[in-house]
Image (cartoon, rainbow, N blue to C red):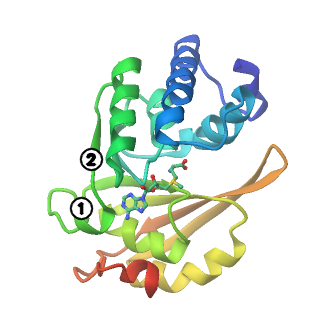
Amino acid sequence: MKNLFLNYGVNVTDKQLESFEKYYSILIEYNKMFNLTAITEKEDVYIKHFVDSVINVDKLVGEKLIDVGSGGGFPAIPIKIMREDINVTLLEATGKKCEFLKAVIKELDLKNINVINGRAEDLAKDSSYRESFDICTARAVARLNTLCEYCMPFVKVGGQFVSFKGNATEELEEGLNAIKILGGSVKQAYSYQLDGAGRTLIYIDKVKSTDKKYPRGNGKERKMPL
Ligand code: SAM
């Protein structure tokens, strides 16, 4: 599968490839019980989950990353496989998925990575997590306006939120108000093609501290997005 990564300009070592192989096996094994992904064919998993998670991994700057709504571990576990230097926190609301994530970490013997079973709206109010990460990532969790309210409070001023999206022109337009209110500024929207599908990485710089009233909680992030 090394060439699959290479086709998308991602260089992987033999050790990293071995970790991806193990990850694929555990994902398929647990998927029967935990419903982690609808994509199970090996090549599809490599392209749509693994490559998609690490396509621009060298661009990440900072020591501490939080991934909101990790589910089956994307993009955070592939990022950790590629970037041992980054300390990774996976935040996931569903307990069973957290069990799976812990099993992957153990099996792959990953270091400086931890799993928190909780909701972004709650954890973002905790002073030991609020504005304490250089990078926040999220893929397939919510529309951008809602997602920014979950994610921006975790990012330090000077840090960055990276949102992994499909075709995102409309969502980006819709999210600009939330981004501004929460102290963000769009640095770049990087678009690419993955197996015939349009994908976008939206890089949002944290330029100002987020007002303490965000996230609002009680489901307002989804019901009444900023
Ligand atoms: N990021 C993974 C991916 O790209 O495959 C999982 C995507 S899955 C569709 C969304 C995940 O986000 C679910 O596992 C869900 O439990 C979690 N989630 C949704 N809202 C959340 C919140 N507010 N806080 C923490 N996790 C959340």
- 58 and 144: which one is in front? 144
Q: Could you tell which of marks 1 and 2 lies nearer the N-terminus? A: 2
- Seen in the picture, residue 101 relative to 12 is either above or below; the reply is below
Amino acid at dot 2: Ile
Image quadrant in which the N terminus is located: top right
Residue at 64 percent of width and 81 percent of height: 173
Crowd tier of the residue under label 1, counting other residues whose Cα lies within 10 Å: few below 14, some 14–19, many 20 or above: some
Instruction: Check disc 1 and report the residue beneath it.
Output: 123
What secondary structure is marked by label 2?
strand
Q: Is residue 54 visible?
A: yes
Amino acid at dot 1: Leu
- Seen in the picture, residue 103 relative to 64 is either above or below; the reply is above
Q: Is residue 167 left or right of residue 119?
A: right
Q: Is residue 73 visible?
A: no
Does the closest atom of ligand 1 sit within 8 Å of the Cβ of label 1?
yes
Q: Is residue 29 left or right of residue 101?
A: right
CB contact under 8 Å: marks 1 and 2: yes
Image quadrant in which the C terminus is located: bottom left
Rendered image: mark on residue 116: 2
Residue at 43 percent of width and 59 percent of height: 160
| Residue 224 % position (x, y) | 44, 88
Residue at 58 percent of width and 39 percent of height: 54
| Residue 7 % position (x, y) | 78, 30
The CA span between labels 1 and 2 is 9 Å
Name the residue at the front extreme.
Answer: 33
| Residue 196 % position (x, y) | 85, 48
What secondary structure is marked by label 1?
helix
Q: Is residue 7 left or right of residue 210?
A: right
Q: Quadrant of ligand 1?
A: bottom left
